[in-house]
Amino acid sequence: MTLTIQIPENVNTILNTLKEHGFEGYAVGGCVRDAILSREPGDWDITTSARPEQVKALFRRTLDTGIQHGTVTVMFGKEGYEVTTYRMDGEYEDHRHPKEVQFTPNLVEDLKRRDFTINAMAYSPETGLVDEFDGVGDLERKCIRCVGTATERFEEDALRMLRGVRFAGQLQFDIEKDTLLAIREKAPTLVNVSAERIRTELTKLLVSDGADRLMVAAQTGLTKYFLPEFDIMLATPQNNPHHCFDVGNHSLEAVRHINEMWREAKVNGEKNPERKPDLTEKEHVMLVYAALLHDVAKPDCMTTDSAGINHFYMHNEWGADKAKKILRRLKFDNDTIDMVSRIIRYHDCRHENCYIDGQYSTKGKKAMRRLMNRIGADAMPLLFMLQRSDLLAQSDYKREEKLAKLSAGERCYREIIEAGEAVTIKDLAIGGREVMALGVKPGPQVGKILHFLMELVLENPEKNTVGELTREAERKIQSESKEEAAE
């Protein structure tokens, strides 16, 4: 195929250096695929006929990032480019790693060992595109297909099955029939893959436009081995006027809405005051997992009333605890586990008093300050996004009213923030040092006094002044002293 790909300057330098010294060199894999699709490649990998020691001799700065498998990273400033010798993998003993690798002078032999046709293309400005397995055709057909025999590819590396689902989601492609059948057959071998590797692929899928391809993982039996809770969610009907999906599909819809809001926040955040424009990538990850797992405990909490309507009392609290266990199993960091479980615990708050008789009301501010105190002000923007995605993934029953209440809650929150009202102990006008200056000894009593003052200010924010809180603290200390004396 005649095709010209714009290659970054540093990649061209590497290819030219290899060529000048008598070696072949090609950009290979995902960068070629993405360039053909007019997508911005995340990184550029290079494959070469040069041995690792020969690559090291050609470039001033290199890192031995995977030299036992033929990979050397060539550094240009802070940018690194993986350069890997053409290789053939030996026998796979653990469904994940080859026992040994054998270097080869043949590019096609190297491409044969790769997972999918769309990732088995190589390109150099001099030779053009090398596409021995019709990767371009599969890109045109929007098809994920294994190189060679699918069962062999998955037998070699079980993670490839989940990678196939992830690529299908990211590119919004379908998985070719024989490849799909092989995933179903080899799904049990996923137990050989580490939780960290699974988490990486699952996360890339969930933050993509095709997060609903998680259904493919469920249909082929993959989720049984890393997220069996999702299978149970799919089997749990809601039978409730507020819902039009089972629990699993409702949760996937919520993930879809999170991703839509994420894109909107990135593109139009400054124009839309109801969206937080500066969400980080990590917060995006937190939100998609919160959306996926916000109803994870509904199957455990389901009851059915005399009218045949299902109810799920306490599912938010049970769900927060269950989500923690799942995220720990997937080896997430503590910050993510903490934030996701917090917003799941409070996702069912309805902000009722912020919207009364069809209009915004400030009567909800007390409840909002208390919510901010319990969940943490840092979690509130994420909570609102989770709540909005949850509502949009429900039936249209009372949807406008629900969204109006949510918008009123967001407005209430913003007004509290803009007014600088205290919602945590660190926001109080006085702290532990001032309390001890009133004669309280260091210890639990200091915290008790501060908690008392916090409760006072949550009810009456105007009392958050040094003078007012000092007087209230003195009264509290005197009252407790009298009680102790009476005992």
Image: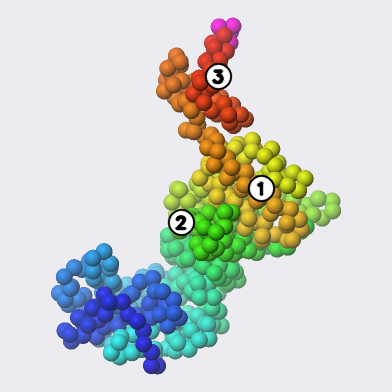
Please tell me whether the stretch drawn in magenta is mainly helix, strand or loop.
Answer: helix
> Which residue is tagged 3?
472
Identify the mark at residue 77; answer none if there is no mark.
none
At mark 2, the secondary structure is loop
- Residue 452 screen position, x and y as percent: 56, 24
Q: Earlier in the sequence, mark 2 or mark 3?
A: 2
Quadrant where the image shows the N terminus: bottom left
| Residue at 55% from the left image edge and 70% from the top image edge | 210
Identify the mark at residue 408; answer none if there is no mark.
1
| Residue at 60% from the left image edge and 62% from the top image edge | 257
- Residue 102 screen position, x and y as percent: 27, 79
Relative depth, front residue between 480 and 194: 480
Residue 347 seen in the current view = yes
Picture layout, residue 463 above or below residue 265: above
Marks 3 and 1 sit apart, C-alpha to C-alpha, by 33 Å
Relative depth, front residue between 122 and 310: 122
Q: Earlier in the sequence, mark 3 or mark 1?
A: 1
Quadrant where the image shows the C terminus: top right
Q: Amino acid at mark 2?
A: Thr
The residue lying furthest to the right in this view is 307
Task: Tell me which segment is drawn in magenta.
Answer: 483-487
